[in-house]
DNA sequence: ACGGTGCCTATTGTCTACAGTAGAGCGGTC
DNA sequence: GACCGCTCTACTGTAGACAATAGGCACCGT
């Protein structure tokens, strides 16, 4: 049996330095597989194979799979195993609307920032984004962009909100993964400028202005080309997609 | 070993008729224990004892515990077991703000109701509420009140939103459980009338009016007497509590 | 008498093994 | 030749056993 290397940090708990549990290890690893496209939506995942691949046994793997199902990345059908969650256009609608709502709630609750040290996290993330943009490292840029948005949400000091937001981000990444082929995303400069502007407004302390900027901000990135790939359309979703298109047209 | 009777319905999945998995059984059972106060916050839960009590083995029990931890009802500390989540005033703040936000988002997305058959679920829940009110059955009333609010959220057709809302409701129930001693909740008539009014506004199709009603509506029930019982105060929470008090004073 | 250290027990984390079921492939029958 | 039923296999669901750790307790030293 190959030794599980325990390289990734623990999911949530545990004092630093302690080896993360195999459940966390498996959850992180499977997340990466899903988000990198190693596991394709619709493809059936069998526990024996995956447990052998990860070098762990089935019980901790099963716990990890349950968690990921709860996070919305996997789909578990009783007695029929798990598959990567196949996303419909309606799912994209749900993810997008929830994300916007979370961000706006966070701004409403947190934006005249009460504890200035929280801004530090935003600033650091933004700097890393800009550095990645200069280096042309798209992967790092994306990663830090997620962290930046999370840090904005975290300004609210709302742990549940931040947690829910992080979970949703994973599903956004899933959307982007599905679009990777079609994705031509290189406007680093413009994006970095928009994020910088966002942070400026936050520091200025005007929630309304931040929300307005967020509405325009909305990353169309993960929407481009998605409708050709997805089935399960509903009218509400299509109508909504048109609306989003219109709103973000003048970027 | 007592046979697990599998009486409660499955958590989420599975075609009807199939016996729910032991994981779902355990999760439901533990939820009930927590929400009925059988398990007290801070009290340590040991897996062997609980597995014997439920008549199942530890692996499915552990999966259930992980799920409940994710739902925010339990707190898992590595190598130190699980306890019922102890709620601080800040947690109540988080739950309350999220709940309001979820409801308002659902109304914004769903209230000019597109698919009228969804209203049926609201009407049924409301009728059951009113019946329970007439019978003076507080437990049933509370249960159907939760279902009514869920059905309102479900008008949006937003599965993720509904799911998140249900999870949050459990934590609201936990709040109420902690307050049960101090709770004197008997204004069935007034509450029923308010819920009826809410549904009328929904059917009228005016999202703004519904949101306004919801703001006034806000169940103070689970807030009464909570601050005396809870530690971990932060300024934001106390300030917010005062605000809520003021807003809902004129009920 | 008090503090430190080592052992010991109970509990968590993990693994291997067993039972039951769903799907696939094959053969039989109409 | 096509359709239905059976068997057989592989996987999921569950159980019980093993390993490792943390907290408690007693004993020893000062």
Image (cartoon, coloured by chain):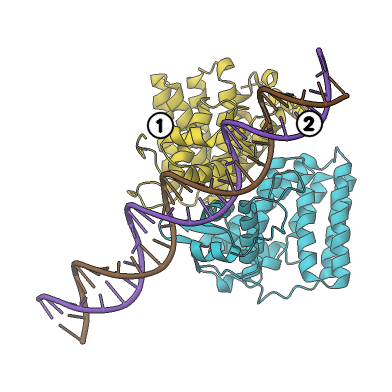
Chain colours: A cyan, B yellow, C purple, D brown
Question: Horizontal and vertical percent for residue A249?
Answer: 73, 67
Q: Considering the numbered disc 1 on the image, is that residue within a helix, a strand or a loop?
A: helix
Question: Horizontal and vertical percent for residue A246?
Answer: 68, 64
Q: Which residue is mark 2?
A: B236
Residue at 69%, 74% in the rendered image: A183
Within-10-Å neighbours for mark 2: few <14, some 14–19, many 20+: some
Dividing the picture into quarters, in which one does residue A105 lie? top right
Circle on res. B127: 1
Q: Is residue C23 left or right of residue D2?
A: right
Q: Chain of mark 2?
A: B
Question: Horizontal and vertical percent for residue A2?
Answer: 62, 65
Q: Considering the numbered disc 2 on the image, is that residue within a helix, a strand or a loop?
A: helix
Assign the N terminus of chain A to one quadrant of the image. Answer: bottom right
> Is residue B206 in sight in this rendering?
no
**A246 is higher (above) or lower (below) than B181:** below
**D27 is higher (above) or lower (below) than D8:** above
Residue at 57%, 68% in the rendered image: A39
Dividing the picture into quarters, in which one does residue B10 lie? top left
């Amino acid at each position: 049996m190959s030794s599980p290397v325990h390289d990734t940090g623990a999911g949530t708990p545990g004092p630093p330095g302690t080896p993360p549990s195999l459940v966390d290890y498996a959850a992180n690893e499977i997340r990466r597989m899903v988000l990198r496209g190693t596991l394709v939506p619709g493809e059936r995942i069998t526990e024996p194979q995956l447990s052998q691949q990860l070098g762990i046994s089935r019980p901790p793997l099963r716990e990890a799979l349950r968690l990921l199902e709860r996070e919305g990345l996997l789909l578990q059908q009783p007695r029929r195993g798990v598959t990567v969650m196949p996303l419909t256009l309606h799912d994209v609608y749900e993810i997008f609307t929830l994300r916007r709502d979370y961000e706006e709630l966070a701004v409403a609750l947190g934006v005249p920032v009460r504890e200035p040290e929280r801004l530090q996290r935003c600033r650091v993330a933004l700097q890393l984004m800009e550095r990645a943009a200069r280096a042309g490292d798209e992967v790092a840029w994306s990663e830090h962009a997620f962290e930046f948005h999370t840090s904005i949400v975290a300004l609210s000091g709302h742990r549940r909100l931040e947690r829910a937001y992080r979970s949703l981000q994973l599903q956004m990444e899933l959307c982007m993964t599905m679009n990777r082929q079609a994705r031509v995303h290189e406007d680093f400069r413009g994006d970095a400028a928009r994020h910088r502007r966002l942070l400026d407004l936050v520091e200025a302390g005007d929630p309304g202005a931040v929300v307005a900027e967020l509405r325009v901000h909305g990353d169309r990135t993960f929407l481009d080309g998605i409708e050709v790939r997805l089935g399960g359309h509903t009218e509400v979703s299509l109508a909504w997609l048109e609306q989003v298109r219109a709103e973000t047209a003048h970027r």
